Image (cartoon, rainbow, N blue to C red):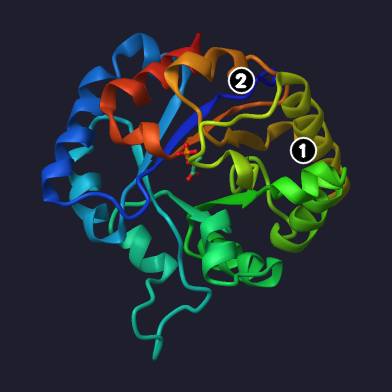
Amino acid sequence: MTNNIRPLVAGNWKMNGLKAELAIASAVAQGYEPGLRRSVDLAICPPATLLFAVSAALIGSRIATGGQDCSAHESGAYTGEVSAAMLADSGAQFVIVGHSERRTLHGERDADVNAKAEAAQAAQLVPIVCVGETRAEREAGKALAVVKKQLRGSIPQGSTGATLVVAYEPVWAIGTGLTPTVADVADMHAGIRTELARLLGKSVAPGVRVLYGGSVKPSNAAELMGVANVDGALVGGASLKAEDFLGIARACGA
Ligand code: PEP
């Protein structure tokens, strides 16, 4: 954790969820009791088709919602794309950009991620900018260099703690059950904070939330969330079970 930063636990439902899964959002809202509310922020990022309904189900709960991606364009002839303004209009406060599945499966490069993050901020959304190295890059000792390059290329200039969240997600840890060691997480998050200070300024960097993501579950959350400079979690698989998501939130707020 970082002093004076309110942690954020964000759930990425990925391409999972039909109307029946609105019950997950309601169960999370029910479990977000006042003690937890005092210590940790929550966000749910459902598929775009459910965003309006999840946002409506969460009114009054103080749980935010977010998109999982957005177009870099404002509007127009971009069939199939969803703009940041559309996400905001559906109730979102956040949008995940540059998730490794977008970078790998859709060929998104840092410049694309940067354009999407800029579009998000222009629509008053807070982008959750994902960065992270592959297994091969870690084994080659290049993890920090790769992540710093992604940060440099992806983060909008002039971002602040109120307008930007960063998520460190080692690609090899996503959905695999594998996690880096606590020491590796500590090194990486310290390196990210230093790079943020270089990019955004020394007074801004301490206020930017840097989440860890990759196989977070209730059983490992306390250890991971206890690492310096880890300000919450981006949760994939475990966010689809309300009790697991809340368990992670409790570990984070403890
Ligand atoms: C993710 O997709 O952002 C993620 C962290 O997934 P998981 O928690 O399932 O590893």
Callout 1, which amino acid? Ala
- The residue that label 1 is drawn on is 205
Residue at horizontal 84 percent and vertical 41 percent from the top? 197
N-term-proximal mark, 2 vs 1: 1
Q: How many marks?
A: 2
Q: Secondary structure at mark 1?
A: helix
Question: x and y percent of residue 202 in the render?
Answer: 86, 38
Q: Secondary structure at mark 2?
A: helix
- How far apart, in angstroms, are the residues tagged by discs 2 and 1? 21 Å
- The residue that label 2 is drawn on is 224
Depth check, front residue: 103 or 34: 103
Mark 2 sits near ligand 1, with its Cβ under 8 Å away: no
Residue at horizontal 71 percent and vertical 20 percent from the top? 182
Callout 2, which amino acid? Leu
Question: x and y percent of residue 103 in the render?
Answer: 59, 63
Residue at horizontal 37 percent and vertical 71 percent from the top? 82
Question: x and y percent of residue 36 in the render?
Answer: 38, 14
Question: As drawn, is 188 to the left or to the right of 211?
Answer: right
Question: x and y percent of residue 33 in the render?
Answer: 29, 14
Quadrant location of the N terminus? Answer: top right
Depth check, front residue: 158 or 192: 192
